[in-house]
Image (cartoon, helix red, strand yellow):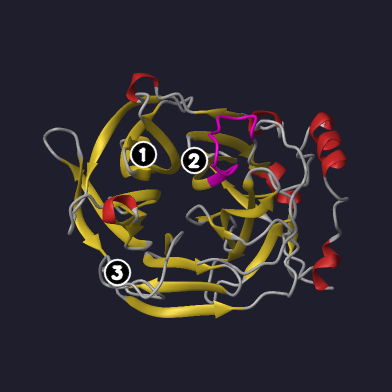
């Protein structure tokens, strides 16, 4: 669910995402696994005992269907994030030609959970059943090395009904995570709504908190995002989000930021970035009539570094890697009167973070020329 926002048109010019930051940022190369009639984009990320996996939307061009036919694939990644090989994913379907798109993945206690937007295209491409959220449980591969779903859950909450066609409205971008071994889901950002579910996916409890009137993010409605990851020594979860603004030439432009929330009920928002890490650009692969998109779906924190996977312009997959120490100074307290020490996990446990420069001089000069001066933390209270 989205957070309402009223925002101006963005008239700035952005270079390729590869040039917007000093941090390593690259496109995934799928090689021969990507024929000309297929696009991979909006990938989730999950690390399991058998390695690091990219779970990506696969869109096949089909006549009379503007969005193509969408399902998911799993790609094993090398240590340098190169896709080594791809495997199919077999889902439980209730209708012919069900679509699955925009996956988020979570691993916990030997089980992989993959959520996605689910729907059916109707009337030869003229209509659809609407955006439905589904959660698929995987814990095995079949004898052909295809990811085989063990259980399908159609959670009933918000506008989401028990099946496709039984929703009362559209639902997208649900973010699942485990808190103290219990299944939870981030539903919206403002108000911040986190829900607890039973192991079988039945809604149990809602935690709802409000935030200051102005969170300090001026780039449109905040939407999820990557599944929350515990970052603080008894303190916070962090999630990377996307938002968008109208664009005079390209319909809409998307942006990527991050926020944190308390690692205990009621999961109140604590910090948020004020400026985007990345913005969609027409200098990257792009097609006419598509928006300019950066769409984070997966993240991993390992040895003090974040790896974030994202879709680009509804056509490609990319990743960015950033040190957590660089991210810390960019997160502003929602309540600046609170004085909390910040920690992150590495192999030695919780380590206090000292602020450090997050951008190269070239990046700072470019951002200064493109955007307003950075606001101080106290601006969030006005």
Task: State how many labels appear.
Answer: 3
Q: Main secondary structure of the magenta part?
A: loop
Question: Quick one: 299 or 287, which is closer to the camera?
Answer: 287
- Queried whether the magenta region covers residue 285, the answer comes back as yes
Number of residues whose C-alpha sits closer than 10 Å to that of mark 3, classed few (under 14), some (14–19) or many (20 or more): some
Query: Magenta segment range?
Result: 282-295
Label 1 – label 3 distance at C-alpha: 28 Å
Number of residues whose C-alpha sits closer than 10 Å to that of mark 2, classed few (under 14), some (14–19) or many (20 or more): many
Residue ID at (32%, 51%): 125
Q: Name the front one of labels 3 and 2.
A: 2
Q: Residue most toward the left?
A: 143
- x and y percent of residue 90 in the render? 20, 45
Q: Residue 4 carries which label?
A: none
Verify CB contact (< 8 Å) between mark 1 and mark 3: no
For marks 2 and 1, the one nearer the N-term is 1
- x and y percent of residue 170 in the render? 42, 67
Q: Which mark is residue 314?
A: 2
Residue, disc 1? 59
Label 3 – label 2 distance at C-alpha: 30 Å
When the figure is inspected, residue 333 is found, relative to residue 365, above or below; the finding is below
């Amino acid at each position: 669910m989205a957070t309402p926002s009223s925002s101006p048109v963005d008239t700035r010019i952005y270079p390729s995402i590869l040039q917007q930051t000093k941090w390593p940022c690259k496109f995934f190369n799928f090689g021969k696994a990507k024929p000309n009639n297929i696009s991979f984009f909006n990938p989730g990320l999950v690390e399991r005992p058998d390695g690091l996996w990219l779970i990506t939307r696969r869109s096949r061009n089909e006549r009379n269907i503007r969005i193509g036919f969408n399902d998911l694939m799993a790609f094993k990644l090398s240590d340098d994030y190169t896709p080594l090989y791809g495997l199919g994913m077999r889902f439980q379907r209730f209708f012919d030609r069900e679509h699955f798109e925009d996956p988020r993945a979570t691993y916990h206690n030997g089980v992989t959970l993959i959520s996605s937007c689910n729907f059916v295209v109707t009337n030869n491409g003229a209509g659809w059943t609407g955006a439905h959220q589904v959660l698929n449980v995987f814990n095995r591969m079949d004898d052909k090395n295809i990811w085989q779903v063990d259980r399908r859950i159609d959670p009933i909450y918000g506008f989401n009904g028990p099946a496709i066609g039984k929703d009362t409205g559209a639902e997208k971008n649900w973010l699942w995570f485990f808190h103290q071994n219990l299944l939870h889901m981030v539903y919206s950002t403002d108000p911040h709504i986190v829900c607890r579910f039973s192991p079988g996916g039945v809604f149990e409890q809602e935690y709802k908190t409000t935030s200051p009137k102005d969170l300090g993010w001026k780039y449109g409605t905040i939407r999820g995002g990557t599944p929350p990851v515990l970052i603080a020594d008894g303190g916070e979860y962090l999630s990377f989000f996307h938002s968008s603004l109208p664009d005079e030439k390209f319909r809409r432009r998307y942006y990527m930021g991050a926020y944190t929330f308390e690692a205990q009920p009621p999961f109140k928002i604590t910090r948020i970035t004020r400026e985007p890490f990345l913005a969609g650009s027409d200098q990257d692969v792009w097609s006419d009539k598509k928006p300019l998109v950066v769409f984070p779906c997966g993240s991993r924190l390992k040895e003090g570094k974040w790896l974030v996977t994202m879709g680009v312009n509804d056509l490609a997959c990319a990743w960015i890697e950033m040190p957590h120490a660089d991210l810390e100074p960019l997160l502003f307290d929602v309540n600046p009167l609170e004085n909390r020490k910040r920690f992150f996990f590495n192999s030695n446990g919780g380590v206090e973070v000292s602020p450090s420069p997050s951008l190269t001089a070239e990046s700072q000069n470019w951002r200064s020329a493109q955007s307003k001066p950075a606001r101080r933390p106290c601006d969030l209270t006005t």
